[in-house]
Image (tube, rainbow, N blue to C red):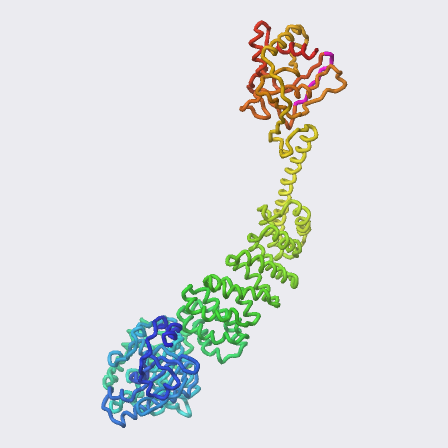
Amino acid sequence: MFAKLKGTGTCGTSGQPGQPIPATSPVDNNPISQFFEIGKQIGSAGPELAWKVYEGYRKSDGKEVSVFYFDKKWTEKFGKSSGKRRECISEVLKCGAIQLDRFRHSKILQIVAKVEETNENLAFASEPIIGSLANILGYLEDRLRQGVPSVLREYTFSEFETKYGLLQITEALLYLHYSCKIIHRNICPQSVIINKRGTWKLSGFEFTVKCNDGDNMLPVSCPAFTSKSPKMSQPDLDFMAPEVQASSACSPQSDMFSFGLLICSIFNNGRSPIQAALSTANYTKQLETLNRSVQELLDRMPILLAENVPSLLEAASRKRPTSQSFSMIKYFMDPGVHALQYLDTIHMKDSVHKANFYPSLRGVLCTIPKKMWFQHILPTICAELQFSDVLAAALQPILYIIEECNTDEYQNHILPIIRNLYQAPKSIQATVTLLENINILIRKSGQHEIKNEILPMLFNSLDSTQPQVQIAALSAISEVIEHLEEATIKQIVIPKARQILEVNDSIQVQTNILNCVAKVIDNLEKNEILDDVLPLLLEAKLTEVSVLTPVLAIYRHMLSDKRFGLNVNLLATKVMPTLIPIIVSPNITVEEFNTLADLLQEMLDHINRNQRNKLKLERMSTFSTEKYPLQHNLDQPTGYPHRPPCLKLATRRQSISVDDVLKTTTTAINSNASSPDLNLLRVQTNLPYRRHSDNAIEPPRILIGSASPAYGSGTLSMTSSMANLPRRRHSSVNPNEVKGLTYNFFNPPRPVHKTGSNSAFKLDFPIPGRTSPGRGRRYSVATIINQSQSSSSTLLNQLGTGMQQLFGR
């Protein structure tokens, strides 16, 4: 159990594993052991460190405590042992414990169980402590074996901790001098206790006396230090005021002198400027050189403190500052220190004061060392988390600490505190506070905590009937989107968002829903976007700037990818009609107008680009089908002129020999050598060609041109010519281009007609052998003619005359 307590504590030794509980403990002989389980010794305190301090916890509720134990036999170590001497020391220590129980103040050590006495020992229980200031400073270590862990001796104070601790002791003296009218008489390191929260507490009330009844500042009689009495029954001589030793008189100013020596010892490795070694003669001698010794120590102190310490050590008590005036020096004017001062008394304040204080505490945490966050602040705030009326305010400093601490500190110190809040009933404001800061919790939590604690809290908040909680939950979703599965987004987030919108369509709800949609839209399918997201966008109140901004962002994102399903029909019929009226709204700013105008222009360009391409394709498909009908396979896609049409096998044709071609061609050339249209190219419809196979391939019937009835029956139809004129197939020839003969399916050549009895077509495309920008391949028939008719003037004239006669038959 003690190992567990040490592992979860917040003191400087919390990281050290606890020691096993001894089989027997000295405290077991005291009745207090019936109520408390006693562990190992952790420190010592009191006159000559007579009290040994043990860790422990209360058996009834497990509350952690510290047990102070005094063994009466130990008096033998400090002098001659006699029954009277033993009883004197026991009575002094018992009186101090009883007095300590009388004073209930935040700056005084709190008693949990009153002192129990037996013939052999004394024991009482207090709030859990680290040890005394004497243990940490190593005071009396040269004379006494303190029996404390070495870790405690390595405990150090920051400048802030020292400032705060000194103010604690000043406040305790102020309470004693003015409220209780008591003089402490033994302000020294053994009387200052450091509790588990790092707070300095005053104890050691063995030698208190009452102040003067008429004037608190007037001296009263008190015994001086003497070697005739046991050291444990007298105040520490090294911290005694000079008037006490000189005139056996003391006042509240005597405590201030002792307090000045205590401050010097903190900056002097735990040693007082007066080292009397229990000798009054040494005390008197060193008192004379006190000023010089103090001046050497002032350089080690902060400037604002060094300015005031010499006044505490004035020989004349009336020149010393009071506890009240000293508490107001500039050295203590630190917002962080005063915040901790108020925090120490927060349990005495009402809920209104608490709710106002905790948010302001968050603002000064940056001036407080992180060590004190976990030692002092968190344990105090934990006690406030059980009150729903201050829970939201108390979460403010906790969230700041979470944000500033590392992952290990969060796991060890904060997670045990805040884990209980996730599923526990909370006030509306507390729930909203957690949701608004969910990004901080996510960054510090592991996957297990996120999945099993944070996300369930978020989903439960979506089911809340409170608008504030709903709005905060919707806003929080965008922060945890990376930790949500797609199924969770589709099945929980979007449906619940729509349900909330149906109940509450306020501007803030719409804004948070749209911001949430903007985060999750990439995880949605096309049908979910069209069915769930697009209606939200179309129904949004675009006249509000907070709504318009996320809507425009979502539309722009959807426009960037086809998978979102925002086609031209939706843009033209639904989206743009809702956006266009907003562009003339008087509520939008110049920046919003520019954003909206750019988006509308982008949408219009998208429509223009897609619709224009669509119309072009439809027009081309219609033009090719109506004016140039194609015979093609039913499986062949249409409307794409760049694809070559399928060819269809016609009837088998008989092979024609080359001799027949030469004979027919020669006859035609000889009979028309004198024709006036000699230079015109004639097309022979039944001109044989080179056979590739027995199966004739019938080209598609593309209407190149048609003869007008006005031209007469003797006019040759280009349709029939091209239909009967086969082409030579060659692998190097483009489907739309024969070398030297280019044909464009999109812009076919127009026939040029000549009237007359011998009219013929004049083709626009280049003729092989004539001036042409391209170099074309000659037809095979021309090669045959060239080989057979070497006597003719030109091959072209002969071919033209022969074709004219053939067509004239």
Identify whether 553 is placed above or below 420. Answer: above
Measuring from the top left, give residue 505's x and y in whole percent.
Answer: 65, 61
Instruction: Single out the residue that lies furthest toward the bottom.
Output: 84
790 vs 384: above or below: above
Q: Residue at x 57, y 12 (%)?
A: 784
Give the magenta part as a residue range: 749-757
Residue 277 appears in view: yes
Q: Quadrant of the C terminus?
A: top right
In the image, is 486 to the left or to the right of 637? Answer: left
- Quadrant of the drawing holding the N terminus: bottom left
In this picture, is 638 found above or below 156? above
Residue 138 magenta-highlighted: no
- Rendering quarter of residue 668: top right
Residue 307 is situated, as x and y percent measured from the top left of the image, at 36, 74
The answer to whether any part of residue 241 appears in the image is no
Which one is nearer the viewer's eye here, 587 or 465?
465
Q: Quadrant of residue 76?
A: bottom left
- Establish if 269 lies above or below 31: above
310 or 430: nearer the viewer: 430
